[in-house]
Image (spheres, helix red, strand yellow):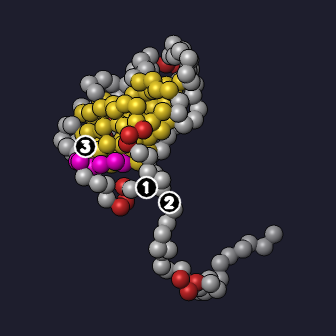
Amino acid sequence: MAARRPAVPLSPCPSASGATSLPARLADVPAIPPRTAVRTRTFELAEHQINGRKMDPGRIDAHMLRDTTEIWDVRSGDGTLHSFHVHDVQFQVLSVDDRRPPPHLSGWKDTVLLPPGTRMRLIMRFADYADPHRPYMFHCHMLYHEDQGMMGQFLVLERGQTPAPPPSPGLRRHHH
Ligand SMILES: [Cu+2]
């Protein structure tokens, strides 16, 4: 089969009259109302730990019921740049240091950058994928930090489910 190559020089797309301008309105992001949150959890990232604990595959740090909404109050507490990444859900940023988030933090996120001393309130709904055996991770996404243990795990449960004991560490996989 003949190799396909782009024309040289490239010509503009036939309908390119508005191609360099963004539409006035991008995707709608329906705000998750804070009053729907059933609890607030606090996470301080410092010294390669979260809330003073390193990742332990044998410890579940939080459980929540499927179909509930929570606020996670996250802070970089050691004068270092961190980030915060949550598996399973996408979240919205309610506030950055008690102010409304800037435009680039107003959409759906799965990771936020946490400058030193910064506090962000995140809101998330655990809408899917309850499983008493398989926890989800949350962690700083700087590889060195997470590898040092700046990570925790949570289980999403159906009403009436009880958490299974965590499997042995050798059976566990984590992907970023
Ligand atoms: Cu970090």
Q: CA distance from mark 2 to mark 3?
A: 26 Å
Question: Which numbered disc, 2 or 3, marks the residue that appears first in the sequence?
Answer: 2
For the N terminus, the image quarter is: bottom right
Q: CA distance from mark 1 to mark 3?
A: 18 Å
Is the CB atom of the residue marked by disc 3 within 8 angstroms of ligand 1's nearest atom?
Answer: no
Secondary-structure class at tag 3: strand
Characterize the local packing of mark 1: few (<14), some (14-19) or many (20 or more) Cα atoms within 10 angstroms: some
**Residue at 74 percent of width and 72 percent of height:** 3
Expressed as whole percent of the image width and height from the top left, the position of residue 158 reads 56, 24
Characterize the local packing of mark 3: few (<14), some (14-19) or many (20 or more) Cα atoms within 10 angstroms: some
Can residue 143 be seen by looking at this rendering? no
User: To which residue does mark 2 refer?
Assistant: 28
Q: Above or below — where is 12 with respect to 164?
A: below
Q: Above or below — where is 31 with respect to 5?
A: above
Q: Which mark is residue 107?
A: 1
Secondary-structure class at tag 2: loop
Q: Residue furthest front?
A: 35
Expressed as whole percent of the image width and height from the top left, the position of residue 52 reads 26, 25
Q: Which mark is residue 55?
A: none
Question: Which numbered disc, 1 or 2, marks the residue that appears first in the sequence?
Answer: 2
Can residue 137 be seen by looking at this rendering? yes
Check if residue 61 falls in the magenta segment.
no
User: To which residue does mark 3 refer?
Assistant: 119
Check if residue 94 falls in the magenta segment.
yes
Does 167 sit left or right of 45 as displayed? Answer: right
Image: magenta residue range: 93-98
